[in-house]
Image (cartoon, rainbow, N blue to C red):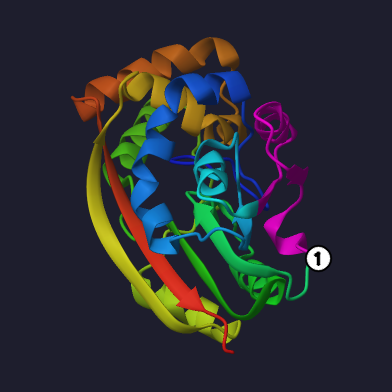
Amino acid sequence: MGEDGLSPAALSTSKWDAADYARVAAFVGELGGAALDLLDPKAGERILDVGCGEGTLTKKIIERGAALLGIDNSPEMIAAARAKGIDAVLMDTTDIPFSSEFDAAFSNATLHWVLKKEQAARAIFRALKPAGRFAGEMGGEGNLAKLREALDEELIIRGYVPPVEASNWYPSPDEFAAVYEAAGFREVDARLIERATPIEHGIAAWVTTFRKGWLDRAGVPEGERAEIAAAVADRVGSNVADYVRLRFIMRKPA
């Protein structure tokens, strides 16, 4: 998962500090409960957690009696998940090698980090058994627009050039459905949910944790990041992040 969620599971545009993530990002797992309910894991099912991160939601799936494999492309996150007793392996979403092995797949706050979205969709499709379902949540169209604009404005004022290439894919429901239908999925139900989210540790901590990769690419020295993050928090004027989520469920044909 990533930025607003667990660590990215493919073509990451950010790098993660597991301890820092655990401190600042507890809200991510808490807010992913609705997507988990949509998955509705059953005892005895084999489920693939795409972008398991440090395993907060992964544990909840296991508690419902499912057999689970978590994948993530962050070694730090995989180590944290394994420390919780989770079966987790280092793997990019685009490189999933499985074929018709899982009853269901789940992903929370990861797919917006996966820029090779068509390749990822095909890989997840292949991993599912016929009639298998894929449910989850990610950043959707308009996600964090105010926060991202505030950060870029602050970078420009200080003489830095924000990266030209996007670090995230925040699709509309139609755009998302088109990618996954092209991969073979059917019954794709994708909906945007506006969810302004209070950040317990504040917007400045959010910036240094979830936009680390953006600051890396802009060439911002470590010593200046706290000051920039504080300035962004002043621009935003509250500790509320303007999240827009895209929640989805779909099926592989029987």
Q: Is residue 11 left or right of residue 202?
A: right
- Residue 250, x across and y down, in percent: 47, 76
Q: Which residues are magenta?
A: 68-97
Q: Residue 239: within the magenta?
A: no
Q: Residue 80: within the magenta?
A: yes
Pick the quarter of the image with the C terminus: bottom right
Q: Using a 10 Å C-alpha cutoff, classify the residue at mark 1 as few (fewer than 14 neighbours), some (14 to 19) or many (20 or more).
A: few
The answer, for residue 140, to whether it is visible in the render is: no
Q: Is residue 197 left or right of residue 40?
A: left
Figure check: 144 above or below 50? above
Q: In front: 129, or 110?
A: 129
Which residue is identified by label 1? 97
- Residue 91, x across and y down, in percent: 76, 50
Pick the quarter of the image with the N terminus: top right
Q: Amino acid at mark 1?
A: Pro
Q: In front: 42, or 28?
A: 42
Residue for point 75% across, 62% down: 96
Figure check: 40 above or below 157? below
In the picture, residue 43 is in which quadrant? Answer: bottom right
Which residue ends up furthest to the top in the rendered image? 223
Q: In front: 210, or 24?
A: 24
- Residue 239, x across and y down, in percent: 24, 25
Residue for point 43% across, 70% down: 249
